[in-house]
Amino acid sequence: MKVNILLFGQLTDITGADSFIIEDTIDTDSLVISLQKNYPALSNARYLIAVDKKVIETNTLLPDNCIVALLPPFSGG
């Protein structure tokens, strides 16, 4: 199983990339644990998770080849 990760804003500074692929992740909870293990600074970052363009608030299964976006807080004007 392959999950495409997109990052924005300050999250790209933490990871050093704006996108990458993670394999063998079945749900968003395990994804967050994996990301925080590889990028400890993400533990202190605030962000929303969107799976295939839908913001999620609970643990969600990740279909193969889905796109997960990590969205930091934003403001506009």
Image (cartoon, rainbow, N blue to C red):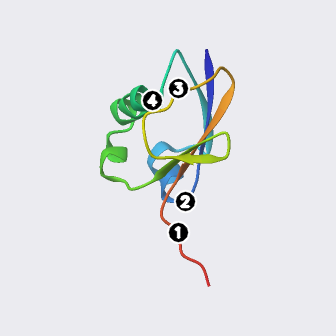
Hey, which quadrant is residue 35 in on the image? Answer: top left
Give the residue furthest to the bottom. 77
- On screen, residue 14 above or below 25: below
List x then y, in percent, for residue 5. Answer: 60, 36
The residue at 61%/14% (across/down) is 1
Identify the secondary structure beneath mark 2. loop
Q: Which residue is mark 4?
A: 31
Q: Which residue is mark 2?
A: 9
Mark 4–mark 2 CB contact (< 8 Å): no
Mark 2–mark 3 CB contact (< 8 Å): no
Q: Quadrant of the C terminus?
A: bottom right
Identify the secondary structure beneath mark 4. helix
Q: Which residue is mark 3?
A: 61
Q: Which residue is mark 1?
A: 74
Mark closest to the chain's N terminus, 4 or 2: 2
Alpha carbon separation for disc pair 2 and 3:
25 Å
Alpha carbon separation for disc pair 4 and 2:
19 Å
Mark closest to the chain's N terminus, 2 or 3: 2
42 or 1, which is in the foreground? 1
Query: Badge 4: few (under 14), some or many (20 or more) residues near its Cα, within 10 Å?
Result: many
Alpha carbon separation for disc pair 3 and 1:
26 Å
List x then y, in percent, for residue 40. Answer: 32, 40
The residue at 58%/54% (across/down) is 8
Q: Nearer the viewer, mark 3 or mark 4?
A: 3
Mark closest to the chain's N terminus, 4 or 1: 4
